[in-house]
Amino acid sequence: MAYSFVNRTIDSRTGATLRSTDPKSVSSGSSADLTVSASGATGFQWYEVAADGADQLLAGQTTSQLTATVSSTRRFWVRAKNTTCTVDSNVATITPTACTEPNTAVTMATTVARGASAQASVSQPAGGASYAWTVTGGTITSGQTASTVTFTVHCDAALVTAKVDVTVACTTKPGSKNASTSAASSVTLASARATIPQGSSETITVELTGTPPWTVTWSDGAPSWSGSETSFERVVTPSGTTTYTATATDKNGCPASDSLALTVTLPAPANLAAAAISGTQVRLDWTLAGFADSFEIERRAPGGGFVSHGSATTSPVTLSASANTAYLYRVRAVKAGTRSGWSNVDLATTVIFGADVVARETTLTASHITQLRTAVSAVRALWNSGLAPAVFTDATLQGVAAKAIHITELRNVLNEARTGLLLPAWGYSTPAPTVGQPFAAAHVNDLRGGVR
């Protein structure tokens, strides 16, 4: 068998040689590898030479390589064998050297700017040392394995911690340092009023912090603003309730946002007029001193309250209805999700009268009173559908002479129903006829107006 040995102190023992892959001297506490080269060998057994010179068998160390931890001088040899012979190697002496710990003091600014580039360094780099950096609150851009690391501070970081592990031949030691960060970028919106009437303007005040200059953009697509001033103003005239969001980006690219809602009150539609244009149709007309995207319509029918009855984008609008029925209508405006108050309430009854009665031209007939009784009864049913039908004098009018009571009864029923419906008292153009006094064309036209 042939043996070779390098980089170890050799004691003369036999012709065998021992080879180590490590230097002759190793740092105290570190490991050394010993390797024997023996051609044709089929087995190995390692021994250590004790302080008294005695050989101590190393149990389980039966390969061509031995790894030993060295904190004091140690000596080893190996016995190699095959089926025909046994040969002992020379003795290898491993001498430890003292370990010099690396410097791990980290140098970094006490305050770093959010969004900006910063550095941290090991103040006295050790020769042959390796470095492994981690940065909390920042993203490393270069130098992660060098003595100086460069990183970008996170925009939301209130504290940055730079940590490093410094490794030399005998040990690895950590070091770290903290740095506070500059004031966070922020934008604050404020206005004197939170609610404004439609058509009026309001001033939004914008306050900024961070690293100037800033660029401010708006959610409603208004022109952006750029500058180094810490505040500025914007005047807005929203047509409907609007939430304004400003996003400010500072010099280092750090963004911040804030929102301000301005509630716009809409004027209620006015002058609502409801009129039956056929036995099954009602037309609504109204005016609006403002702007609206649409109008919501509600209707009250006999036996119920106000419920939705469609919508419109403009006035007038024609809606379906049932014949010989009285309804109440109201309308409100909608703009950008904001609703106005309700309009005035108006009455419409789908009893279709003929032309106005003209004094000394129109002949009054029983049908004029019958139609009025139908219409007034419809208004009464709208007020309270649970009431029994109104009772009128002379239920059958054919061949009956016109009487003042015919008009008086209609007025009384209509007035009671309008009061119950909270409608304004109806203004009659002429007093009710007295007993024995014939009624006139104006009496009929007044009653028609009160139910339409």
Image: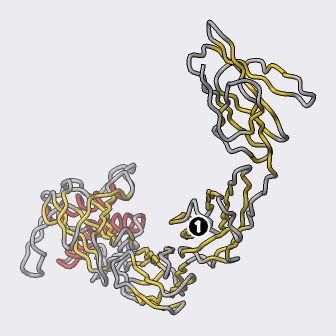
The percent position of residue 318, horizontal first and vertical second, equals 17, 65
Q: Is residue 58 above or below residue 391?
A: above
Residue drawn where x is 67% and y is 29% of the image: 17
Is 117 left, or right, of 441 in this rendering?
right
Name the quadrant containing residue 145: bottom right
Name the quadrant containing residue 227: bottom left
Residue drawn where x is 55% and y is 65% of the image: 143
The percent position of residue 216, horizontal first and vertical second, equals 43, 82
Closer to us: 419 or 33: 33
Is 414 left, or right, of 274 in this rendering?
right
What scheme was used to colour the molecule? Answer: secondary structure
Closer to us: 274 or 48: 48
Residue drawn where x is 13% and y is 75% of the image: 356
Q: Is residue 329 above or below residue 225?
A: above
Q: Specify the farthest residue to the top.
A: 83
> Could you tell me which secondary element the residue under label 1 belongs to?
strand
The percent position of residue 440, horizontal first and vertical second, equals 19, 77
Closer to us: 234 or 321: 234
The disc labelled 1 sits on which kind of residue? Val
Number of marks in picture: 1
Q: Which residue is mark 1?
A: 149
Q: Is residue 145 above or below residue 233?
A: above
Closer to us: 53 or 391: 53
Q: Specify the farthest residue to the right.
A: 52
Residue drawn where x is 60% and y is 76% of the image: 184
